Image (cartoon, helix red, strand yellow):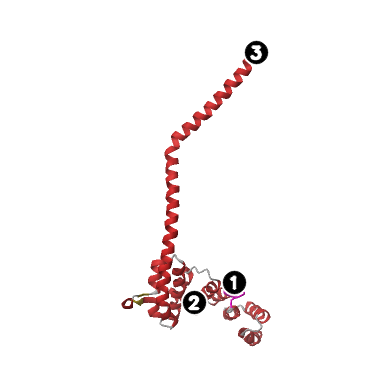
């Protein structure tokens, strides 16, 4: 009899535990169902927003590409001021307007890169550096050129130490870049001008070793002789 009572008590306790667990869950849901509903709405909004963003970004990128195609010939012909400002009378928008309207897109960033080149070629070096710094280009050869652009801005502003660092970074970023030896040579020149002859010598030796067929390698020996005195 005692044994049956104990078994009954265990079953009752288990049922009570289940009921308590259920009631706790129900209570939590009742307390938090507004939060859960809001989370569900938020997720739905995020999904919808993500879809809208992707499609909107694609549309804007296409617009940026079309605008860039219209203005690029002016850049290519060295008409940098026109490339920056555009020709409204010919329905040609400038690189600055493209960047302002579509700067977060792929072609908006490419426009930013060419805008930086325009500023550099018109002597607006602070604007050029800012534009180079803001450009986000995914093509390796454009990226190394962007880094070298920052280096060139530092050099023209007589900050030879930073110019050397950025030229070296560009020279070591992409082994397949045809300008690699030139970037390294520029880095060596700026290291020398900043007083760091050891690093300059090291880079000239690297150019001779790894880029022996380049024009930079042909000049490297002469620069080495000058540095060694």
Residue 2, numbered circle: 3
- Upstream in sequence: badge 3 or badge 1: 3
Q: Is residue 8 magenta?
A: no
Residue at the spot x=49%, y=29% of the render?
Answer: 23
Of residues 157 and 79, the one drawn nearer to the viewer in this rendering: 79
Q: Secondary structure at mark 2?
A: helix
Disc 2 vs disc 3: Cβ atoms closer than 8 Å? no
Residue at the spot x=60%, y=18% of the render?
Answer: 9
Residue 94 is situated, as x and y percent measured from the top left of the image, at: 38, 75
Q: Is residue 75 visible?
A: yes
Up-down relation of residue 121 to residue 132 (above or below): below
Residue count near mark 2 (Cα–Cα under 10 Å), binned few <14, some 14–19, many ≥20: many
Whole-number angstrom distance, CA of label 2 to CA of label 3: 94 Å
Residue 41 is situated, as x and y percent measured from the top left of the image, at: 42, 45
Up-down relation of residue 12 to residue 69 (above or below): above
Residue 53 is situated, as x and y percent measured from the top left of the image, at: 43, 58
Range covered by the magenta-colored residues: 170-177
Residue count near mark 3 (Cα–Cα under 10 Å), binned few <14, some 14–19, many ≥20: few
Q: Is residue 229 visible?
A: no
- Upstream in sequence: badge 1 or badge 2: 2
Residue 54 is situated, as x and y percent measured from the top left of the image, at: 45, 59
Up-down relation of residue 37 to residue 10 (above or below): below
| Residue at the extreme right | 209
Quarter in which the C terminus is drawn: bottom right
Nearer the observer: mark 1 or 2; the answer is 1
Return the residue at label 2. 153
Query: Horizontally, is 97 left or right of 12 in the view?
Result: left
Of residues 122 and 159, the one drawn nearer to the viewer in this rendering: 122
Return the residue at label 1. 173
Residue count near mark 1 (Cα–Cα under 10 Å), binned few <14, some 14–19, many ≥20: some
- Upstream in sequence: badge 2 or badge 3: 3
Of residues 57 and 194, the one drawn nearer to the viewer in this rendering: 57
């Amino acid at each position: 009899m005692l044994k049956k009572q104990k078994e009954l008590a265990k079953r009752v306790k288990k049922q009570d535990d289940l009921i308590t667990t259920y009631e706790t869950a129900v209570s939590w849901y009742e307390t938090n169902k507004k939060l859960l509903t809001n989370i569900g709405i938020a997720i739905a909004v995020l999904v919808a927003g993500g879809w809208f963003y992707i499609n909107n970004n694609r549309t804007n990128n296409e617009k940026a590409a079309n605008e860039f195609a219209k203005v690029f010939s002016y850049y290519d012909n060295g008409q940098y001021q026109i490339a920056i400002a555009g020709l409204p009378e010919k329905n040609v928008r400038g690189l600055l307007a493209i960047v302002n309207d579509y700067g977060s897109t792929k072609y908006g960033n490419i426009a930013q890169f060419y805008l930086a080149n325009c500023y550099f070629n018109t002597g607006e070096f602070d604007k050029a550096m800012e534009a180079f710094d803001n450009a986000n280009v995914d093509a390796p050869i454009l990226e190394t050129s962007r880094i070298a652009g920052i280096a060139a801005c530092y050099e023209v502003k007589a900050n030879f130490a930073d110019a050397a660092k950025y030229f070296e970074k560009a020279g070591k970023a992409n082994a397949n870049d045809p300008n690699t030896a030139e970037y390294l040579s520029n880095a060596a020149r700026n290291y020398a001008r900043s007083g760091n002859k050891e690093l300059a010598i090291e880079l000239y030796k690297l150019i001779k070793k790894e880029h022996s067929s380049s024009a930079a390698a042909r000049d490297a020996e002469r620069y080495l002789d000058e540095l060694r005195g």
